[in-house]
Image (cartoon, helix red, strand yellow):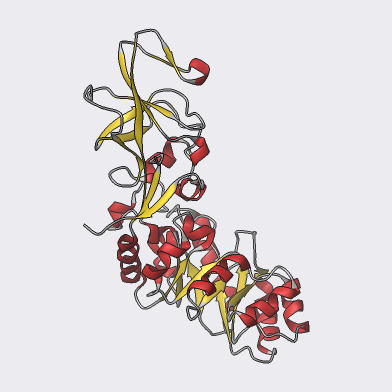
Amino acid sequence: MARNTVATIDVAAIAHNLAEVRARAGAAHVMAVVKADAYGHGLRRCLSALSGADMLAVATMDEARSIRALAPELPVLLLEGVVSPEELALVEQLHLEMVVHHPVQLEWIEAATARPGRRIWLKLDSGMHRLGFPLHQAHQVQARLGAISGIEEVVLMTHFACADQADHPLNLKQIERFDEAVAGLGGRQCLANSSALLTLPQARRDWVRAGLLLYGVSPLHGQCGAGLGLKPVMTLETRLIAVNHVAAGESIGYGARFHARSPMCIGVAAIGYGDGYPRNMPDGTPVRVNDREQRLAGRVSMDMITIDLEGQPEARVGDPVVLWGRGLPVERIAAEVDTIAYELLCRVTRRVQYREAHPS
């Protein structure tokens, strides 16, 4: 018998969210970011719903290979570019596009017989100081790329450090720096990611990179995707495997962290940090049992959690438990452990079964 710990993926919700992104992007082309196995949702099952995007974007060559095996015709961008001269041949062979962000990549392209395609994405560092050429080199690098046989277009791009904080002064500073550096270069530009699409209308240029929004989740602090008209794609759920009665004064779980102040009904659910549910979830973290909100009571174990079933004395073994997703935004759960929804979605382990939601 299956353990019944399941991540249910609503593929129709992805298509809905892509339409919402397009509405916000206006005339800009939409790049769907599917790195990290579509943010933990499963690339294979998400791909059909994202076929309407203008391009897909991944981090690694292995991710690009996976897309090519499933969708030979979709445009695919390598966000980190190539990590060796040998990968340049794969860019040509698999008909990929690539970001160039470092002098060594530029040198590889100039020295190679393989060609990286007709369009190159030139990344400039406007203030995040992670990847990208210094801004003062923008004209020089674009000229070198333009001199390479076969390259017909250079798209200028950058990445924001604080776009999820609408009022952070670095946002406008990065835009001003970028615009000043590329003045006179012409060509198309790609600045906005999911956060900037929401907070920085002046960053919506020719291309936008949509990631978390496609999966129904808000990248902004204190906001949930539903408030943006999005639908959650992943629902992580399990079942009660025991219902116990605990006397007042007794402790529950490892470390005896939680103590019952009165007689309690405690549910044990089949999920833990071995499934990707964080061990540092505090007492009181919300879960939904039988579509009613309950609270964690005790430390998360490798395979199990314990839940205060106050108000549900009728709860039974086999009753459904939702950890996040339908009726319980993952953004709320991430806030409980001072992390971001990206991390929770990407950390679900292989022990969890994945399945697609059936249309209602």
311 relative to 47 in the view: left or right: left
Q: Residue furthest bottom?
A: 149
Instruction: Inspect this view and state whether residue 319 appears.
Output: yes
Residue 352 sits above or below residue 88 on the image: above
For the point 39% across and 70% down, which residue is it? 48
Q: Residue furthest front?
A: 1
Which one is nearer the viewer's eye here, 354 or 20? 354
| x, y percent for residue 307 | 36, 26
334 relative to 77 in the view: left or right: left
Which one is nearer the viewer's eye here, 195 or 67? 67
| x, y percent for residue 165 | 45, 52
For the point 46% across and 32% down, which residue is it? 281
| x, y percent for residue 256 | 49, 15
Identify the image quadrant of the N terminus.
Answer: top left
Report which quarter residue 177 is drawn in: bottom right
Which one is nearer the viewer's eye here, 5 or 200? 5
Instruction: Inspect this view and state whether residue 217 appears.
Output: no
Identify the image quadrant of the C terminus.
Answer: bottom left
For the point 33% across and 53% down, which residue is it? 232
| x, y percent for residue 124 | 62, 70
For the point 41% across and 62% down, which residue is it? 45
Q: How many marks do you count on the picture?
A: 0
